[in-house]
Image (spheres, rainbow, N blue to C red):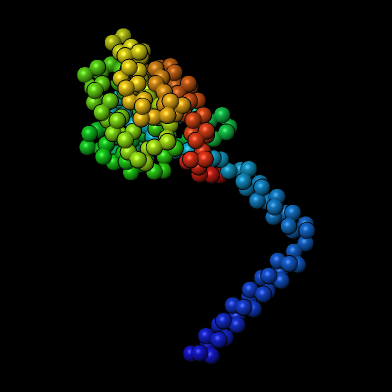
Amino acid sequence: KKEADHIKAQRVVYQSLFNFNCFCRSSPLDTMFHLAQSLYTHLMEWPEYSVLILGLDNAGKTTLLEELKERYIKGYKKIPSGRIIPTVGQNMTTLAVDNEVRLKFWDVGGQDALRELWEDYYSDSHGIVFVIDSCDAERLNECKNTLEKIINDDKVEGLPILMLANKQDMPQALEIANIKEVFNKMAEHLNANDSSVLAISARTGEGVSEAVKWIKDRVVLNKDARPPKFRK
């Protein structure tokens, strides 16, 4: 057994010497080729950031995701809002934005029983979009408590958070100023540069482009704290 181990060790040494010798004998042209290949591979990779779309059930999260897919995926036709059913689990799509980055959006179910699963996504996320139903004044306080729970989780610290007041196209929608008043009470827990409230209509698409630009700019600015993944 000792002799067999000795022979095995010799083979490892000889193989290492052979590999080293081949490396040393590589021509400058080979070296340049490998460098160019590595550079090409790097240039073909896109920085990818994961963004959570959270909010209570019926807030319009999946409608927002469908609007995003129609805007950024050529030829895609969104599902009409009237045919969208409540999300049980998650919906996900990855979109190329401005030929700069990829944003992977995760639409996670908002039913009370599913909210406990949200925290499983925080560690791998780069930003959070929190959607509220501007037409449901009775649940505004529930929205506030839910968002506070998100903000107070240590895994969310430093993440940009965008609050979207959805359904602003509806006549019964709350004024954006009233929604901002609720949100501003929590601003002390956030860096002012990393949070905002925007008015949108996921159904008509109003304000959606501005929302995407805001979250894209913020996750890129925060890349040192939460580096992106690179994908081909």
Image quarter of residue 152: top left
Q: Is residue 171 above or below residue 12?
A: above
Image quarter of residue 119: top left
Q: Farthest residue in the right direction?
A: 28
Image quarter of residue 101: top right
Q: Nearer the viewer, residue 90 or 112?
A: 112
Q: Farthest residue in the front direction?
A: 188
Horizontal side of 228 relative to 13 (left or right) equals: left
Q: Residue at left 49%, top 30%?
A: 218
Percent x, y of residue 165: 35, 19
Q: Is residue 146 above or below residue 1?
A: above
Q: Residue at left 73%, top 67%?
A: 24
Percent x, y of residue 108: 33, 35
Numbered disc total? 0
Horizontal side of 112 relative to 155 (left or right) equals: left
Horizontal side of 133 relative to 40 (left or right) equals: left
Q: Residue at left 48%, top 40%?
A: 225
Percent x, y of residue 41: 62, 48
Q: Is residue 225 above or below residue 188?
A: below
Quick one: quadrant of the C terminus? Answer: top right
Q: Residue at left 48%, top 38%?
A: 49
- Residue 215 visible somewhere in the drawing: yes
- Residue 92 visible somewhere in the drawing: no
Q: Nearer the viewer, residue 1 or 196?
A: 196
Horizontal side of 22 relative to 89 (left or right) equals: right
